[in-house]
Amino acid sequence: MPLAVFTSPGPLLFQLGPFSLRWYGLLIAIAVLCGLALATRLGKQRGIDPALIADLLPLLVLAAVVGARLYYVTFEWRQYQLNWLDALAIWRGGIAIHGALIGGTLAVIFYSRWRKIPFWTLLDVLLPSVALGQAIGRWGNFFNSEAFGLPTDLPWKLTIPFANRPVEFLDQSTFHPTFLYESLWNIGVLVLLLTLFQRGLRGQINLPSGAISCVYLVAYSCGRLWIEGLRIDPLCLIGAPPYCEGGLRMAQLISLLLISLGSFGLYWLYGKRQPLPDPSGVKA
């Protein structure tokens, strides 16, 4: 007997004349507001003026959304090359978290240099909010019936409408809810980061600037590495879609690079016992 069979009610929350509200947009708005509240609270604990966090928010959201969409369109250009205006239709889905991380990081570098805030201190405050936002935002994939995994009969299977199934699986109706796996994983990452953050504030552990950021890179990427292996719509670096047969899944490659980068950062902080280089040029 199934424990839970997920079935999306569809991407549209409601429509009133020409105005429509989609679940994806609502979830992104909720994620931004929750992230702002959390980052403001953590910023206060690290001596960052809440007004600085609020001023950063519009720039950060814009850079993350543009980066996420640009990253996705770059690797899925075959979908847009005949009608490039479709690349602007972000409300239809099609964003990549790694692109958002790249865009957001560039925004934080720029902002920290401009406002004279140590980059790693600011990033340590922001990344728990990123994990929270990812946990919330992943449910947008559920309502859009996208980013799901291979067919499965597990008790927590996800029912996908016929129109959203790949041609290879038209005879299958239930799939791995990879959106749920990643949402739960991100909640675990959030709990880990907040626990380390608070223990560092209390002096229970040595937590130099940049440590939270490095832990995030390793923890999130470990989850994305295995979850990506279940998905049937990966962005391919090499190989033919939809499964990158004989090639590489871009998200898995980036995850391995981020795991390596985060691990090296932790070694630098705790093994060599030196502060991480600050791209903002501002001393903590």
Image (cartoon, rainbow, N blue to C red):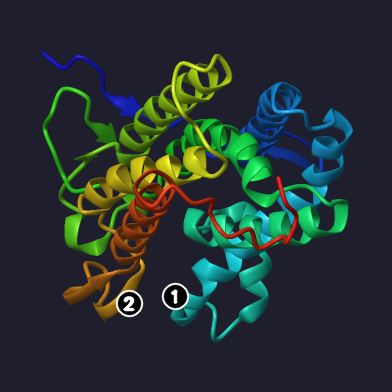
Q: Which amino acid does label 1 sit on?
A: Phe
Q: Pointer 2: what residue?
A: 237
Q: Is residue 218 left or right of residue 281?
A: left
Identified at 68% across, 76% down, the residue is: 85
Q: Can residue 227 be seen in this view?
A: yes
181 lies above or below 118: above
Q: Position of residue 126 (x, y in %)?
A: 63, 38
Q: Residue 162 carries which label?
A: none
Disc 2: CA contacts within 10 A as few (<14), some (14-19) or many (>=20): some
Q: Which of marks 1 and 2 is nearer the N terminus?
A: 1
53 lies above or below 63: above
Contact? badges 1 and 2 (CB < 8 Å) = yes
140 lies above or below 93: above
Q: Where is residue 81 in the image (x, y as percent from the top left)?
A: 54, 85
Identified at 49% across, 80% down, the residue is: 77
221 lies above or below 257: above
Q: Pointer 1: what residue?
A: 75
Q: Among all residues in the image, which is located at the extreme front?
A: 273
Identified at 57% across, 35% down, the residue is: 133
